[in-house]
Image (spheres, rainbow, N blue to C red):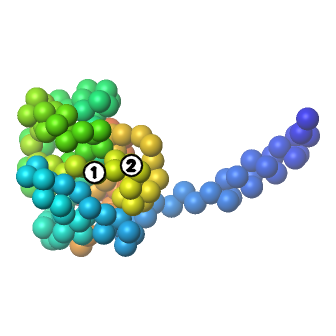
Amino acid sequence: MLKKSSFLVLILFVFVGCDFNSPTNFTEKAMNDSFFDVNNKSIELKEILNNHKEQKILINVWASWCRDCVVGFPNLKEFQKNNPAVKYVFLSTNRSVFSWKKAIKKYDIKGEHYYMKNGLNSDFGDFLNSNWIPRYLVVNENGTIDLFKAKKITDKRIVEALKK
């Protein structure tokens, strides 16, 4: 049984040893990771971001099987109405291309859509360092990440990051 002082030292070690900083730039591996667009054309993350240079981008990592993702779509649509200048990029972790494309139509999701071939088991997934979706990131006009992690579109930090 651990003594109280030993337990406190252990807790302190865990917290001091953890890096709670959020990255502001994508890693080279993440930038070179490949996705598929809705026409089954392969595209790297750096190309997706480059297509929106000098624009604010909201990235949504999602899947049709994710209950939290689907439940959040009405709020997302309202968010899009209130923020029309933002470019919306959806990265799907669906298990099949068929279910991904079916969900885009079913939920009438507006924006650019890309399929993550290997889901979160990819270089981009490693960069996210998460096993939870939905996941929102805000990328500014310079390609810098202003918000690395939000789980709901209603997170006030998303709007704050877009206002920067």
Gap in angstroms between the C-alphas marked 1 and 2: 8 Å
The quarter of the picture where residue 30 lies is bottom left
Q: Where is residue 34 in the image (x, y as percent from the top left)?
A: 26, 61
Residue pointed to by mark 1: 116
Within 10 Å of disc 1 (Cα), the crowding (few <14, some 14-19, many 20+) is: many
Q: Where is residue 59 in the image (x, y as percent from the top left)?
A: 25, 52
Closest to the observer, 146 or 73: 73
Please give left or right for residue 96 compared with residue 17 in the image. Answer: left
In the image, what residue occupies the spot 39% across and 60% down?
123
Within 10 Å of disc 2 (Cα), the crowding (few <14, some 14-19, many 20+) is: many
- Residue 149 higher or lower than 27, as above or below: above
The quarter of the picture where residue 104 lies is top left
Q: Position of residue 139 (x, y in %)?
A: 26, 61
| Residue 120 in sight from this viewpoint | yes
What amino acid type should be assigned to the residue bearing mark 1? Met
Q: How many marks?
A: 2
CB atoms of marks 1 and 2 within 8 Å? yes
Residue pointed to by mark 2: 120
For the N terminus, give its image quadrant: top right
In the image, what residue occupies the spot 24% across and 29% down?
70
The quarter of the picture where residue 29 lies is bottom left
Q: Is mark 1 on a helix, strand or loop?
A: strand
Please give left or right for residue 107 compared with residue 160 in the image. Answer: left
What amino acid type should be assigned to the residue bearing mark 2? Leu
| Residue 88 in sight from this viewpoint | no
Q: Is mark 2 on a helix, strand or loop?
A: loop
Q: Position of residue 149 (x, y in %)?
A: 39, 50
